[in-house]
Image (cartoon, coloured by chain):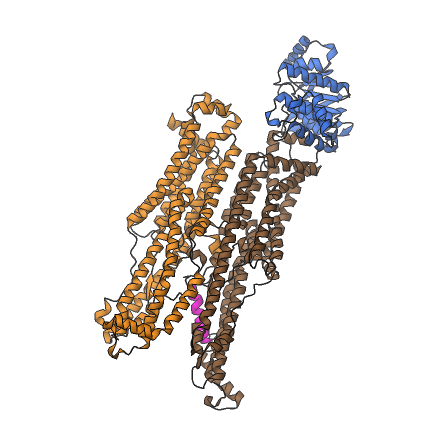
Chain colours: A blue, B brown, C orange
C-alpha cells in the first residue's frame, strides 16, 4: 500500500533521504525510528507529495505519488504531531469540513458516530476546538481518517506530549485501524509505543534504513539497546 | 469541493471577532456617510434652486433700463449638484458654484465650496465612495492576509492538502467564500443606498439607475481585484506577518500616496497655465485676433464695409437697422471664437491631466476607480465642463437677444434704447439638462478599462500562484 | 547596563535590511515633500511679489502725476487698491489652504459688496481634491506609518515565539526593556523627521521664524512620541506580532483617515455656512432695490451728512452710485457676516475637537505655524475688512464734495500693509496642540505600564 523505491531527496548538498526502500502492506503498522534530522518527516512529506523526490519513487496503492499527488492523497490520512484544526469551528464542523475536502460527505449523525468511534467525548463534539486538548484534536484526526476511509495512515510523532492514558487510548485506536486493513506508517521517538503497536520497526539514520526488525522478534529492552547500537555505529 | 471550502471560509470569516468589529465599524461609517451626504446634498440642491428662482425674480424685476445695460447686469447661474453626489461628491467641493453670465466676457465658475470649509476637508471627505475605495480594501486585507499564509504557519494547510484537495480549488474556494462574506456585508448597504437615492428629489433623472448599475460594476471589479491580489500575496508569503506587512504597504501606496503622486505627475507632464498668462493671452486674442495679426478694429472696419456692400448702401446711417447692434453681435461672435478656443484648450488640458491620472491607475487601481466613480456619479470634470458649456451657450443666447433688440428696435447711432419687463421675459430662464448616462459612461471608460485590466490581472496572478501553493 | 542594552537594540535595527529600506523611503518622501512644497511656495511668492510690484508702480505713477496736477479721486478709487497677503513665514512646512484661499483682494470703492471671482490661480479641481505631496503630508500621514513599521513589534513577536519568556527569565524589567527598545528603534525615524522639519525653515523660512520652527519641531517630535507610545501600549497586550500590526494599522486608519473626515462632516452639519448662491442672489436683490431708490437714498444720505452735500445738491452719477453701493453693502453685510461667523464656529469646533486625533492637532499646528492655515488668512480677511473701511473713509467725502487728490493727500492715501498676528496667538494655539499630543502619549504610556506590571505580564507570557 505504502511503498518507496530507492527514494532519494537532497536539500542543497545535504542528503535527507538516501535510496530508501520501504513496503508497508495493508494491516501493517510500521514504526520509523531515528534521531532528529534522520529524514523521518521528509519521508512522510515525500509520501504526501509535499516534496518531489530527486531520485527513486514514492508509491501509494501502487501509483507514483509524484505523478499524481492528488490521487495519492485521496488514499492517505495524515496525522501530524499537532493536529491543527480551525479554532472557530466545532469538532463536528472541522470533521465535516476536512472530510468534505477529502471527498466524502457525511450526515451529522455519521460524523458524530465517527467522533465517538475515535473516542471523543460526546459533549465535546459541538464545542469550538479552540478549547480542545492535544489528545482531543488527535481524536478528531483519527475520526477524519475513518471518515475518508483512508487506506493508509501517515503519523508524525503522534504520541509525543500525550499523557500515558491518552497515549494508550490512541494506540488502541491504531490497532483497530490496522485490523481493519489500514497500512500505517508511524514516525516516532517513542520506543515503548513502537514495540507495543508496530508489526515492524525500521531504524532510520542519515536517510538510510540502518535496520529493520519484526516486533515479534524483539523485546522492549532489546529495542533500546538495538537503537543505541545503531546510533553509535 | 469549491463550494464546501467557500462555505467554510464564509462561516469562519463571520466567526472572526476582529472581522465582525471591523465590519460593524465600516458599515456604521458607510451609513453615517450616506445619511449626512443625503442631508447635505438635499440642502445644497434646495438652496441652489431657491437662489436660481430668486435670481430669475431679480432679472425680471430689474426695471426699465438700456438693453445693453441689462447685458452688463447679467445673470447668475448655479452649478447643479448631481443626485449621485450623495454617493460620491467627487470634484463638487472644488469647482465653483456660481457662474456670472454677462456681455463681452466668459467667466469661470466662482465660489468653491471648499473655500467655505475648514482645512479638515483636505483630509478627504467621508462619503460612501471613499469608504468603499479606502476602508473596504483594508477590510479585505484583514480578511485575507492569513487565509493561506496563516494556515501554512499553523499547519492546517498541510492537513488540508494531505487530503488530496487541489490547491487551485482551495484558493478559488477561499476567494469565493471571502468574497461572499464581503458581499453579505456590502449588498445591504448598496440596496440601502439605492433606495435612499430614489427618495432624493430628482434622483431618478438622467438615468440614475443606469449610473448606479455601472457604479456597482466598477466597485465590484475593484474589490474583486483587491481580493484576488491579497489572496495571491497570502499564497506566496512565507508567514502571515509578512503577508500583512506587504498588503499594508500596498494599501498605503494605493490609497494614500498614489493619488497625490499621480496628480503631481500629471501636472508636471501637462502643466496648467497660470491664471495671468491665460487671461492675458485671451484678452490679447480678443483684441488682435486668434492669429495675433488681425486687430479687432480692422476686422470691424472690414465688417462695416462688407455690411454696407451687402445692403447696397454707402453710409452706415442709411442702413435699415441700428448698426451698433450688429457690431455688438459681430464682436460677440468674434469674442466667442476666442473664448471657445482658449477655454477649450484649458479644459482639454485639465481633462488630459485627469486622463493621465486615470491611466496611472494601471499602477494603483484606486485612481482608475476614482475616475470611473466620479464620472458615473456625475461629479467629474467632464460633467462640470458640460455645464460650463451650457451656461456659456445660455450667455450667448441672452446677449444675442439683447443685441438683436438693439439692432432692430432702436434708433441708429444709439447704444440701444430702454427696454422693460416684456423683453426680460422674452429671455428664458436658464435650464440645464445634465448629460445622459452615455456621456458619463464615455468619461468613465478609461477608468473602467483600468479596473477590468486589474481584475483580470489579479485573478490571473491568483490562478498562476495557486498550483504552486507550498504546504510549508 | 541601560546604555549597553540600548546599543544592542540599535545594532539589531541596523542589521535589518527592511529598516534601511524604510528609512531610505522616508528620507526620499521628506525630500520630495520639501521640494514640492517649495515649488508651490515659490509660485505663490512670485505672484505676491508681482502684485506688490504692480501696486508700487501704480503708487509711483500716482506720485508722478500728482507732481504735475491733482487727480480725481474716482480715478484712483475706481482702479482699486490691492491688498496682498505676503508669503507665509514657513511655507515649506505645509501648503495648507494657501492654494484655495485667495491671497489678495482688489479693494474698489464701489464694489465692496460685489463678489467677483475668488480664485487667484487656475487649478485642476482634481489636483485640489487629491491634495499636495508636501512636508505636512509626509509628516502627518506617512511619518506614523513608517514609524509603526519599525516599532509595531516590540514584544508581541517575542511573546509569540517564546523568546519573551526567556528574556524575562533573565530578570529584566519588562517596562524598561520595552521603552528602551521602542526608543532605539524609533530614534532614526524621529531624527529624520526632525531634520526634515528644520530643512523647511532652512530652505524656505523668512527671517525671524526661529520660534515657529522650534515649536514645529516640538510638535513633530511629540507626534512621533505619541505613535511610539501607542505601539508600546498595544504591544503590552497583543498576543502576536500580526495582531499588534493589525491593531496599530486600525488605529492609524481611525486617527489619520477617519477622525478628520468625521470631524469635517460633523462641523459642517452643526454649523453649515449659508449658501453662496443664495448670498449672490440676495446681494443682487438688495442691489436692485437700492438702485431703484437711488435718488431717495442719496437725499437721505445728504440729510444725515449735510457737510458732504455737493454745492447745489446736484449729485453726480458717481456720488449716486457710491451711495447705492454703500446701501447694498449694508444690506448684504449680515449674510456675509454669517459666513464668517459660521466658518469661525467650524474652526473653533475643529480647534476644540482636534484632540480627538493627534493627526488633526498635528495638521492644525503645522499649518498654523507655517502660516498657511485658517488663522493667518482670517487675520488677512479681517484686516482687509478694516482696510475697506479706511478706503471708504478717505475717498467717500472727497467724491461727494468733488474734491481732488493733491500731493498733500499722497501720504494719507490708504495703503494695505499686512500685520502678522501677535506671536502670542499662534504660540498659544500650537502649544495647546503640543500639550494635547503629549498628554495622549503619557496616558498611553501609563496604560502600557499598568499592563506591564509583573503580575499581569506573567499571565500573558504563559
Identity of the residue furthest to the left in this view: C408
User: For the N terminus of chain B, which image quadrant?
Assistant: top right
Along the viewing direction, whichever of A122 and A87 lies nearer the viewer: A122
Query: Which segment is the magenta one?
Result: B275-292
Left or right: residue C18 versus residue A95 is: left
Residue C378 appears at what percent x and percent y? 35, 55
Q: Which residue is drawn at 62% across and 16% down?
A: A163
Residue A224's quadrant in the figure?
A: top right
**In this picture, residue C219 sits left or right of residue C63:** right
Q: Residue at x 52, y 70 (%)?
A: B393
Q: Where is residue C419 in the image (x, y as percent from the top left)?
A: 29, 56
Q: Main secondary structure of the magenta part?
A: helix
| Relative image position of residue A178 (x, y in whole percent) | 75, 19
Percent of width and height locating residue B17: 56, 34
Query: Does residue B181 show up?
Result: yes
The one nearer the camera, C230 or B404, is: B404
Q: Give the residue at x 28% y 79%.
A: C314
Regarding residue C372, the answer to whether it shows in the image is no
Q: Which of B28 and B262 is in front in this view?
A: B28
Above or below, B104 relative to C95: below
Q: Using the image, determine if residue C448 lies above or below residue C106.
A: above
Q: Is residue B280 magenta?
A: yes
Amino acid at each position: 500500500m505504502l511503498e518507496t523505491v530507492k527514494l532519494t531527496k537532497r536539500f542543497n548538498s545535504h542528503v535527507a533521504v538516501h535510496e530508501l526502500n520501504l513496503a508497508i502492506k495493508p494491516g501493517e503498522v510500521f514504526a520509523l525510528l531515528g534521531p532528529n534530522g534522520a529524514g523521518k518527516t521528509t519521508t512522510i512529506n515525500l509520501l504526501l507529495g509535499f516534496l518531489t523526490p530527486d531520485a527513486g519513487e514514492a508509491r501509494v496503492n501502487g501509483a507514483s505519488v509524484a505523478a499524481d499527488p492528488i490521487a495519492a492523497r485521496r488514499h492517505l490520512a495524515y496525522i501530524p504531531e499537532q493536529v491543527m484544526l480551525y479554532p472557530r469551528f466545532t469538532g463536528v464542523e472541522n470533521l465535516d469540513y476536512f472530510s468534505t475536502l477529502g471527498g466524502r460527505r457525511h450526515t451529522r449523525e455519521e460524523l458524530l458516530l465517527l467522533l465517538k468511534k475515535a473516542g471523543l467525548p460526546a459533549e465535546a463534539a459541538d464545542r469550538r476546538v479552540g478549547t480542545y486538548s492535544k489528545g482531543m484534536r488527535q481524536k478528531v484526526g483519527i475520526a477524519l481518517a475513518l471518515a475518508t476511509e483512508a487506506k493508509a495512515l501517515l503519523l508524525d510523532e503522534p504520541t509525543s506530549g500525550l499523557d500515558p492514558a491518552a497515549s494508550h487510548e490512541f494506540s488502541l485506536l491504531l490497532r483497530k485501524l490496522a485490523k481493519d486493513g489500514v497500512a500505517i506508517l508511524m514516525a516516532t521517538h517513542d520506543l515503548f509505543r513502537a514495540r507495543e503497536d508496530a508489526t515492524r520497526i525500521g531504524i532510520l539514520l542519515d536517510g538510510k534504513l540502518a535496520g529493520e526488525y519484526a516486533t515479534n522478534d524483539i523485546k522492549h529492552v532489546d529495542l533500546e539497546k538495538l537503537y543505541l547500537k545503531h546510533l553509535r555505529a | 469541493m469549491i463550494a464546501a471550502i467557500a462555505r467554510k471560509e464564509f462561516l469562519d470569516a463571520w466567526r472572526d471577532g476582529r472581522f465582525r468589529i471591523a465590519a460593524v465599524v465600516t458599515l456604521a461609517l458607510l451609513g453615517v456617510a450616506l445619511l449626512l451626504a443625503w442631508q447635505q446634498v438635499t440642502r445644497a440642491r434646495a438652496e441652489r434652486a431657491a437662489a436660481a428662482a430668486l435670481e430669475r425674480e431679480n432679472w425680471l424685476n430689474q426695471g426699465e433700463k438700456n438693453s445693453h445695460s441689462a447685458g452688463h447686469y447679467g445673470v447668475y447661474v448655479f452649478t447643479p449638484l448631481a443626485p449621485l453626489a450623495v454617493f460620491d461628491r467627487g470634484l463638487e467641493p472644488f469647482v465653483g458654484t456660481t457662474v456670472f453670465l454677462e456681455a463681452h466676457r466668459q467667466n469661470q465658475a466662482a465660489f468653491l465650496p471648499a473655500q467655505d470649509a475648514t482645512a479638515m476637508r483636505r483630509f478627504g471627505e467621508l462619503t460612501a465612495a471613499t469608504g468603499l475605495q479606502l476602508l473596504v480594501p483594508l477590510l479585505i486585507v484583514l480578511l485575507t492576509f492569513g487565509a493561506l499564509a496563516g494556515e501554512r504557519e499553523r499547519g492546517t494547510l498541510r492537513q488540508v492538502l494531505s487530503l488530496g484537495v487541489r490547491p487551485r480549488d482551495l484558493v478559488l474556494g477561499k476567494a469565493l467564500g471571502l468574497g461572499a462574506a464581503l458581499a453579505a456585508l456590502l449588498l445591504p448597504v448598496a440596496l440601502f443606498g439605492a433606495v435612499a437615492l430614489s427618495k432624493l428629489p430628482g434622483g431618478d433623472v438622467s438615468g440614475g439607475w443606469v449610473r448606479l448599475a455601472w457604479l456597482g460594476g466598477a466597485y465590484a471589479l475593484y474589490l474583486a481585484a483587491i481580493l484576488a491580489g491579497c489572496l495571491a500575496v497570502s499564497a506566496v508569503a512565507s508567514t502571515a506577518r509578512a503577508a500583512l506587512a506587504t498588503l499594508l504597504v500596498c494599501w498605503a501606496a494605493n490609497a494614500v500616496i498614489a493619488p497625490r503622486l499621480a496628480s503631481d505627475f500629471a501636472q508636471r507632464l501637462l502643466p496648467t497655465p497660470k491664471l495671468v498668462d491665460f487671461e492675458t493671452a485671451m484678452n490679447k486674442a480678443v483684441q488682435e485676433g486668434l492669429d495675433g495679426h488681425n486687430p479687432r478694429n480692422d476686422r470691424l472696419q472690414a465688417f462695416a464695409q462688407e455690411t454696407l456692400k451687402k445692403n447696397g448702401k454707402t453710409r452706415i446711417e442709411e442702413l435699415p437697422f441700428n448698426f451698433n447692434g450688429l457690431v455688438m453681435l459681430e464682436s460677440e461672435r468674434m469674442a466667442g471664437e476666442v473664448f471657445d478656443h482658449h477655454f477649450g484648450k484649458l479644459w482639454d488640458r485639465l481633462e488630459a491631466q485627469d486622463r493621465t491620472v486615470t491611466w496611472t491607475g494601471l499602477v494603483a487601481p484606486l485612481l482608475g476607480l476614482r475616475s470611473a466613480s466620479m464620472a458615473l456619479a456625475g461629479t467629474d470634470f467632464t460633467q462640470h465642463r458640460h455645464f460650463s458649456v451650457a451656461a456659456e451657450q445660455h450667455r450667448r443666447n441672452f446677449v444675442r437677444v439683447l443685441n438683436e433688440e438693439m439692432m432692430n428696435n432702436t434708433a441708429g447711432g444709439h447704444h440701444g434704447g430702454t427696454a422693460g419687463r416684456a423683453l426680460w421675459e422674452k429671455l428664458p430662464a436658464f435650464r440645464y439638462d445634465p448629460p445622459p448616462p452615455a456621456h458619463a459612461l464615455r468619461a468613465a471608460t478609461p477608468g473602467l478599462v483600468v479596473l477590468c485590466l486589474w481584475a483580470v490581472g489579479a485573478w490571473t496572478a491568483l490562478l498562476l500562484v495557486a498550483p504552486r501553493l507550498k504546504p510549508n | 547596563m541601560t546604555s549597553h542594552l540600548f546599543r544592542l537594540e540599535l545594532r539589531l535595527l541596523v542589521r535589518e535590511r527592511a529598516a534601511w529600506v524604510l528609512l531610505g523611503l522616508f528620507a526620499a518622501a521628506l525630500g520630495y515633500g520639501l521640494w514640492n512644497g517649495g515649488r508651490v511656495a515659490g509660485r505663490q511668492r512670485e505672484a505676491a511679489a508681482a502684485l506688490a510690484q504692480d501696486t508700487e508702480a501704480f503708487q509711483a505713477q500716482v506720485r508722478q502725476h500728482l507732481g504735475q496736477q491733482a487727480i480725481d479721486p474716482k480715478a484712483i478709487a475706481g482702479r482699486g487698491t490691492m491688498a496682498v497677503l505676503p508669503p507665509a513665514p514657513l511655507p515649506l512646512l505645509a501648503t495648507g489652504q494657501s492654494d484655495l484661499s485667495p491671497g489678495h483682494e482688489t479693494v474698489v470703492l464701489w464694489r465692496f459688496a460685489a463678489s467677483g471671482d475668488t480664485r487667484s490661480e487656475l487649478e485642476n479641481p482634481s489636483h485640489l481634491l487629491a491634495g499636495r505631496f508636501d512636508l505636512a503630508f509626509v509628516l502627518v500621514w506617512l511619518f506614523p506609518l513608517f514609524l509603526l513599521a519599525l516599532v509595531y513589534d516590540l514584544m508581541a513577536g517575542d511573546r509569540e515565539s517564546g523568546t519573551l519568556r526567556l528574556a524575562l527569565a533573565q530578570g529584566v524589567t519588562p517596562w524598561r526593556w520595552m521603552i528602551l527598545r521602542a526608543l532605539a528603534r524609533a530614534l532614526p525615524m524621529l531624527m529624520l523627521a526632525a531634520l526634515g522639519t528644520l530643512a523647511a525653515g532652512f530652505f524656505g523660512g523668512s527671517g525671524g521664524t526661529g520660534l515657529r520652527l522650534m515649536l514645529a519641531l516640538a510638535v513633530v517630535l511629540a507626534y512621533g512620541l505619541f505613535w511610539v507610545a501607542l505601539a508600546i501600549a498595544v504591544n503590552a497586550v497583543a498576543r502576536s506580532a500580526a495582531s499588534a500590526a493589525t491593531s496599530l494599522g486600525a488605529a492609524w486608519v481611525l486617527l489619520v483617515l477617519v477622525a478628520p473626515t468625521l470631524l469635517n462632516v460633523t462641523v459642517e452639519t452643526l454649523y453649515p455656512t449659508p449658501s453662496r448662491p443664495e448670498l449672490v442672489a440676495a446681494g443682487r436683490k438688495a442691489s436692485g432695490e437700492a438702485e431703484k431708490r437711488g435718488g431717495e437714498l442719496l437725499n437721505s444720505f445728504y440729510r444725515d451728512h449735510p457737510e458732504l452735500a455737493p454745492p447745489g445738491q446736484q449729485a453726480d452719477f458717481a456720488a449716486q452710485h457710491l451711495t447705492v453701493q454703500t446701501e447694498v453693502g449694508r444690506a448684504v453685510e449680515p449674510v456675509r457676516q454669517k459666513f464668517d461667523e459660521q466658518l469661525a464656529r467650524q474652526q473653533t469646533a475643529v480647534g476644540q475637537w482636534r484632540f480627538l486625533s493627534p493627526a488633526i492637532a498635528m495638521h492644525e499646528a503645522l499649518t498654523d505655524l507655517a502660516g498657511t492655515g485658517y488663522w493667518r488668512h482670517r487675520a488677512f480677511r479681517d484686516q482687509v475688512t478694516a482696510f475697506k473701511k479706511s478706503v471708504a473713509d478717505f475717498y467717500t467725502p472727497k467724491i461727494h464734495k468733488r474734491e481732488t487728490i493733491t500731493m498733500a493727500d499722497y501720504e494719507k492715501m490708504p495703503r494695505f500693509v499686512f500685520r502678522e498676528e501677535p506671536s502670542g496667538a499662534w504660540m498659544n494655539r500650537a502649544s495647546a496642540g503640543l500639550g494635547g499630543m503629549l498628554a495622549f502619549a503619557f496616558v498611553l504610556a501609563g496604560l502600557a505600564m499598568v499592563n506591564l506590571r509583573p503580575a499581569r505580564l506573567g499571565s500573558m507570557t504563559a
